[in-house]
Image: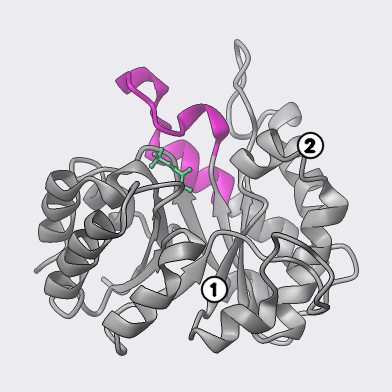
Amino acid sequence: MNKLIVFNFKMAPASFTEVKEVFHIFKRFSQKVKPNKIIIVPPYVYLAEASNIFEKECSLGAQDVFWFNRNSATGEISPKMLKSLGVEYVIVGHSERRKYFNETDEIINSKIKACLSNDLTPILCIGEKNRKEGDSSLSFRIKKILFEQLNYALRGVILENSSDLIITYEPVWAISANQPKELEDPEEIQKTISLIRFWLARRFSEKIAKNMRILYGGSVNSQNIIPFLSLKEINGVLVGRVSTNKIELTKLLKKLIK
Ligand code: 13P
């Protein structure tokens, strides 16, 4: 399996001591899970430490970025700052940023463009907030939501290669689910990913649509990661809360060892 496993730490762990323990777990396993590739996405404040600890075994991502390199933006982090720490990827359009920080489609579009022009690969997150009675991944309502998110986020974007962008389908209702019924059905995910490829083929090219890496996110854990990764259409997963839970993380990484 040659898949991409992205670990979004979100706003965790709470201390430097704990993050070092988490990094140590990644250090132990990252070579063993090859040819799968690990990208760790810790909070900004831990990026410098990650950049010291990891050489080539894990790639580094950031959870956000500002859309300019100029210096009058208090509290923000520029693409150049991320580059200087060895960051290669940036999560853009995560539903938590759309919800808590009112990130608009326009902002998401600016961030995607800022990443591309600074040689950072955006990991664009899209997904519907909820499912209504009778909805499936192919319902008109769901298609409309996903296609609109793609249209806005990628407005005016020019892609030279399929590897310039990664898309994650992350249905908001499936994030940090506590009930099995809240989990998305792998078959449905495959259909949604095919739909995203259909959109990419029309907007960019057949080649980009075929080769772009499309991930799934939403309550991925040690029990379901292998079934998700076994699906041909899914090029990898975006893991949330398990990323900083030392016991669960170890279990999940062990599953990736052949
Ligand atoms: P969980 O894995 O906690 O559901 O989080 C998914 C997510 O939001 C990753 O970005």
Which image quadrant for residue 117? bottom right
Q: Residue furthest top?
A: 133
In the picture of the structure, the residue carrying the numbered disc 1 is: 89
Q: CA distance from mark 1 to mark 2?
A: 27 Å
Q: Amino acid at mark 1?
A: Tyr
Q: Residue 30 magenta-drawn?
A: no
Task: Locate the C terminus and report the quarter of the image it occupies.
Answer: bottom left
Q: Is residue 8 above or below residue 138?
A: below
Q: Position of residue 131 (x, y in %)?
A: 60, 21
The CB of the residue at mark 1 lies under 8 Å from ligand 1: no
At 42% from the left and 61% from the top, the residue drawn is 42
At 55% from the left and 54% from the top, the residue drawn is 168
Q: Nearer the viewer, residue 172 or 245?
A: 245
Q: Nearer the viewer, residue 42 or 123?
A: 42
Which image quadrant for residue 121? bottom right
**Overall secondary structure of the magenta stretch?**
helix
The magenta stretch is 171-193
Q: Amino acid at mark 2?
A: Lys
- Give the SS element for disc 2: helix
Q: Is residue 207 visible?
A: no
Q: Which mark is residue 144?
A: 2
